[in-house]
Image: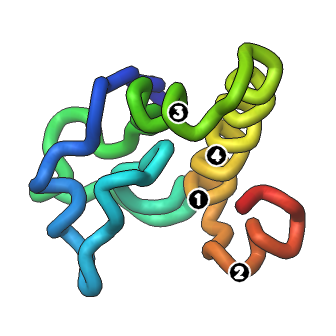
């Protein structure tokens, strides 16, 4: 799964779910979980993880906290790839 870095979330991603996502999200998993098939509507790259650089930098107070949060965010989004929901990820300390 490609991992992309973007400065900030795109409005399209934020509005793709109901209720809309917060513009302060740190990362996002796009696409179906790995055990679900991709469809033509998913496009040529049906799964991707995006980390939002400016939101991560704003969240962290120092370099170590930034490094720790990038790790947690990436593991959180990988959890979505594997089909876990936010409650399951929260229970594993990946909020």
Q: CA distance from mark 3 to mark 4?
A: 17 Å
Q: Could you tell which of marks 2 and 4 lies nearer the N-terminus?
A: 4
**Mark 3 Cα within 10 Å, few/some/many (few <14, many 20+)?**
many
Can you name the residue that lies furthest to the right here?
92
Position of residue 49 measured from the top left corner of the image (x, y, whole percent): 45, 38
Report, in whole angstroms, how far the alpha carbon at label 3 lies from the one at label 1: 19 Å
Q: Position of residue 24 (x, y in %)?
A: 39, 52
Q: Report which residue position mark 1 lands on.
A: 80
When the figure is inspected, residue 36 is found, relative to residue 4, above or below; the finding is below
Q: Secondary structure at mark 2?
A: helix
Please give the label number shown on residue 78: 4
Q: Comparing marks 3 and 1, which lies closer to the viewer? A: 3
Q: Residue at x 32, y 68 (%)?
A: 21
- Residue at label 2? 87
Callout 3: SS: helix
Identify whether 29 is placed above or below 53. below
The crowding category of the residue bearing disc 1, from other C-alpha atoms within 10 Å (few below 14, some 14 to 19, many at least 20), is many
Q: Counting residues from the N terminus, which is met first, the one under dot 2 or under dot 1?
A: 1
Q: Nearer the viewer, residue 2 or 15?
A: 15
Tell me the residue at 75%/67% (across/down).
89
Q: Nearer the viewer, residue 69 or 63?
A: 63
Q: Are marks 2 and 3 in contact (CB under 8 Å)?
A: no
For this rendering, which residue is in front, 8 or 75? 8
Q: Which residue is mark 3?
A: 56
**Mark 2–mark 1 distance (CA, rounded to whole Å):** 11 Å
Is there a contact, CB below 8 Å, between mark 4 and mark 1?
yes
């Amino acid at each position: 799964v490609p991992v992309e870095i973007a400065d900030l979330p795109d409005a399209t991603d934020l509005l793709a779910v109901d209720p809309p996502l917060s513009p302060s999200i740190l990362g996002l998993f796009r696409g179906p979980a790995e055990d679900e098939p991709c469809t033509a509507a998913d496009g040529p790259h049906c799964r991707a993880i995006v980390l939002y650089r400016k939101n991560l930098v704003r969240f962290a107070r120092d370099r170590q906290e930034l490094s720790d949060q990038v790790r947690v965010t990436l593991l959180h989004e990988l959890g979505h790839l594997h089909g876990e929901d936010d409650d399951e990820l929260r229970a594993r300390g990946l909020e």
